[in-house]
Each structure stands twice: as structure tokens, then as C-alpha cells.
């Protein structure tokens, strides 16, 4: 009985880890960017102090989009 229980626990653990790994790949991480022409960073927090001088509007985009636009992580958030 112990062997069956330990195999069942192992199988459940593997299944749980797989589900967590899959869900982290499926969900997109969103970041915020200032739409100003001289802006160069992305921010996880829309209230980041690096966004205080943003004179245009903020845009919520995926992390992948921000990186494809050449944005780097804000120095206040690393």
C-alpha cells in the first residue's frame, strides 16, 4: 500500500509542477511604458518613480512587446 501511495504522490507532484510551468508560460506579463518619444524603459509598476516625468500617456503592453520595441527595465525596478 505504501508503494502505491508514494507513486500516487509522485504522479500528483509531477502533474502539479507541469500545470504550474504551463500556466506561467501561457499568461503574459504586462508592463507599462511611457509613450513619449524619448522614453526607453518599461516598468512593472504603473506608479514607478521612473514614470514621474512622463509627459504623455502610459500604455499597458506585454513584456515581449516592450522588449521588441527596444525597451529596457527601468533602473528603479531592477
Image (cartoon, rainbow, N blue to C red):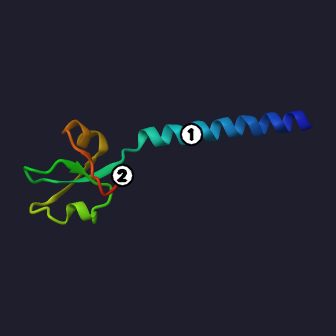
For the image shown, how many numbered marks are present on the structure?
2
Nearer-the-camera pick, 14 or 64? 64
Q: Residue at x 25, y 48 (%)?
A: 61
Q: If the image is split into quadrants, where does the N terminus sit?
A: top right
Which mark is nearer the camera, 1 or 2?
2
Where residue 28 is drawn, which disc sits there?
none
Residue 78, numbered circle: 2
Q: Residues within 10 Å of mark 1 (few under 14, many from 20)?
A: few
Quadrant of residue 8 in the image? top right
**Which percent across, then down, holds residue 11?**
72, 34
Percent position (x, y) of residue 58?
Answer: 18, 58
In the foreground, 52 or 34: 52
Horizontal and vertical percent for residue 16?
63, 41
Helix or strand or loop: what does disc 2 sit on?
Answer: loop
Q: Residue furthest right?
A: 1
Q: Residue at x 28, y 66 (%)?
A: 47
The residue lying toward the viewer, choosing from 32 and 17, is: 32
For the point 47% across and 42% down, which residue is it?
Answer: 24
Q: Image check: 40 left or right of 5?
A: left
**Looking at the image, do the residues carrying marks 1 and 2 touch, with CB atoms under 8 Å apart?**
no
- Res 50 quadrant in image: bottom left
- State the CA–CA distance, disc 1 to disc 2: 28 Å
The residue to which callout 1 is attached is 19
Please name the residue shown 19% across and 66% down the image: 52
Question: What secondary structure is marked by label 1?
Answer: helix
- Residue 65: image quadrant is top left
Residue at far front of view: 75
* Apparent side of residue 15 relative to residue 28 in the rendered image (left or right): right
Amino acid at each position: 500500500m505504501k508503494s502505491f501511495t508514494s507513486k500516487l504522490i509522485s504522479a500528483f507532484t509531477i502533474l502539479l509542477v507541469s500545470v504550474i510551468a504551463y500556466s506561467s508560460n501561457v499568461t503574459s506579463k504586462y508592463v507599462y511604458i511611457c509613450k513619449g518619444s524619448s522614453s526607453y524603459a518599461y516598468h512593472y509598476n504603473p506608479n514607478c518613480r521612473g514614470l514621474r516625468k512622463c509627459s504623455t500617456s502610459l500604455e499597458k503592453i506585454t513584456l515581449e512587446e516592450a522588449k521588441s520595441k527596444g525597451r529596457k527595465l527601468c533602473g528603479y525596478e531592477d
